[in-house]
Structure formats: structure tokens, C-alpha cells
Image: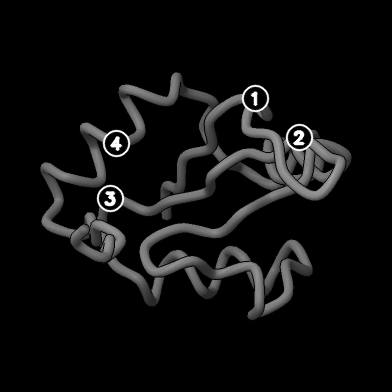
Amino acid sequence: MTVYIDPPTWPGHGRMWSHLVSDVSYEELHAFAAAIGAPARAFDGDHYDIPSDRYADAVASGAVEIGSKELVRLLSAAGLRRRKHRPRD
């Protein structure tokens, strides 16, 4: 099982966040997230939002650290990327 995490550089709700993804399946991603105690509400379509204070826990549990651009590339190459729907003007 390999999951990937980018650095906690994404601001939101007064915190910094990382993205946790799988390049194999959502089932693999959900299983890893459950194992590290990430709540289901942290799932955002194709990734889990992980707060900076949990980053080290994810890495210690086996998440592979990669850059944000590489993370998106892996997710897209695996066919697991889900773009957010944006309303048209």
C-alpha cells in the first residue's frame, strides 16, 4: 500500500493543510486514512485534507512525502483525479 502526502502549505480555517492521495484506489486511500484516524469528513472528492499537526503521523505511518505538483500528476495518471465543479459566470 502506497499513499502520498504533499507538504502542509495549503491555508484554510486558520491552519495549514496537506493532501493525502493514493495512486491505486480510493479503497486504499480510505483504509490508510482510517488507520491514521482521519475523519470521513476530511475526504474531499479525491484526497483527504490532513492538518499540519497530523502530517508527521501520516508520514510515520507510511505516507510518502512528495511535492504538490507531483501529487497531482500521480493522481491524474492513475485516473483518480476529480476536478471540483466550478459554476460558470
The residue under label 1 is which amino acid type? Thr
The residue under label 4 is which amino acid type? Val
Residue pointed to by mark 4: 72
Separation of residues labelled 4 and 3 (CA atoms): 10 Å
Q: In the image, what residue occupies the spot 51% across and 73% down?
A: 30
Separation of residues labelled 1 and 4 (CA atoms): 14 Å
N-terminal-most mark, 3 or 1: 1
Q: Nearer the viewer, mark 2 or mark 3?
A: 2
N-terminal-most mark, 1 or 4: 1
- Label 3: few (<14), some (14–19) or many (≥20) C-alpha neighbours in 10 Å: many
Callout 1 touching callout 2 (CB < 8 Å): yes
The residue under label 3 is which amino acid type? Asp
Q: Which mark is residue 59?
A: none
Q: Nearer the viewer, mark 4 or mark 2?
A: 2
Up-down relation of residue 33 to residue 31 (above or below): above
State the count of labels: 4
- Label 4: few (<14), some (14–19) or many (≥20) C-alpha neighbours in 10 Å: some
Q: Nearer the viewer, mark 4 or mark 3?
A: 4
Q: Secondary structure at mark 3?
A: loop
Q: In the image, what residue occupies the spot 24% across and 37% down?
A: 74
Q: Which mark is residue 23?
A: 3
Q: Which residue occupies the foreground of this view, 25 or 40? A: 40
Residue pointed to by mark 2: 16
N-terminal-most mark, 2 or 3: 2
